[in-house]
Structures are given as C-alpha cells and as structure tokens.
C-alpha cells in the first residue's frame, strides 16, 4: 500500500469534463493498493494520515493536522503508484491489486478517514481524472506499508 500525501491550499478533480470533487485547505492523498493489501493496513494508514501534523501552528511549526484544523482530504485512487520500473522503460503494474479488490480497499480507506473525523472527497475509481491543485510549501509525504 502506498500513499503520496500533499499539502494544498485548494484542489479540484474533474472526470469527463465535469467537476466531481473540490477542497480548500487540506491534503490530497494519492492512494495505491498492492496485491495482498488488507483492511488492517488501511486502518493504520488512515489513522496516520488523519493525524499527520504538516500544517503550521501560531509559531510557524508544522504541528497541526487536518483534524485540528477541520481541513478536508481529497483521496484519489492511483494504481500507478505501484509501478515497477526495474526492467525497461515501460512500467509494469503487475504488483497492483485487481481493480475490484483495490476499489473495495480504497472505499474502506476513505470511510476510515471519515471515521477518524476528517471530511473526505473522492476521485472516480478507474476514471480518467484531471486534478488541479495548488501545493503549499510544497509539503509531500510518502507512506509505503
């Protein structure tokens, strides 16, 4: 399971030319499910990301989370995070979970984030999405479990 987490001042996600999701200050989470990943891993990751302290406090230190500030998360399923580039120039995605199971874990992960107390906006699983975001910092954190 991999997640790329980016701090943003805003983000929009469109699919087929239509606005699907939009957030102001918060996090964009690109989420990839590997073969054999479990709900237990999603539980752990949801707790970590909901509590991730990457927003500045009054002293300018990264000490606050989405939970503290009531910020939103835009969560986007992205199997390409599981790309294997060890051979040649064309990525192999053989390590990614099958789409049905990956979608189940993606939805589970989003629900777990919500249970942690964060408002979650979603992408379109398997969709050809266009995402616009304004990174703040930039701050990017990568989880691989």
Image: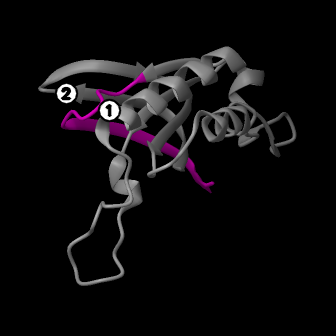
Q: How far, Cα to Cα, is label 1 from label 2?
A: 20 Å
Residue 137, magenta (yes or no): yes
Residue 144's image quarter? Answer: bottom right
Q: Which residue is mark 2?
A: 15
Q: Nearer the viewer, mark 1 or mark 2?
A: 1
Is most of the magenta stretch helix, strand or loop?
Answer: strand
Give 47 or 60, whichever is nearer the viewer: 47
Give 135 or 89, whichever is nearer the viewer: 89
Q: Which residue is mark 1?
A: 100
Residue 91's image quarter? Answer: bottom left
User: Please, is residue 116 above or below residue 5 in the view?
Assistant: above
**Measured from the top left, where is residue 125 in percent x and y?**
30, 30
**Measured from the top left, where is residue 94 in percent x and y?**
31, 61
Image quadrant containing the C terminus:
bottom right
First in sequence: mark 1 vs mark 2: 2
Q: How is the image coloured?
A: one colour
The span shown in magenta is 122-145
**Measured from the top left, where is residue 27 in percent x and y?**
55, 35
């Amino acid at each position: 399971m991999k997640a790329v987490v980016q701090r943003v001042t805003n983000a929009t996600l469109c699919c087929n030319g239509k606005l699907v999701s939009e957030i102001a200050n918060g996090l964009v989470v690109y989420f990839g499910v590997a073969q054999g990943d479990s709900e237990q891993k999603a539980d752990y990751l949801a707790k970590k990301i909901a509590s991730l302290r990457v927003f500045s406090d009054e002293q300018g230190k990264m000490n606050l989370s989405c939970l503290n500030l009531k910020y939103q998360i835009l969560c986007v399923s992205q199997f390409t995070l599981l790309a294997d580039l060890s051979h040649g120039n064309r990525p192999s995605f053989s390590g990614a979970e099958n789409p049905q199971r990956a979608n189940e874990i993606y939805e589970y992960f989003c629900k777990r984030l919500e249970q942690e107390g964060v408002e979650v906006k979603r992408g379109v699983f398997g969709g050809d999405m266009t995402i616009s975001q304004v990174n703040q910092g930039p701050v990017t954190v990568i989880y691989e479990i």
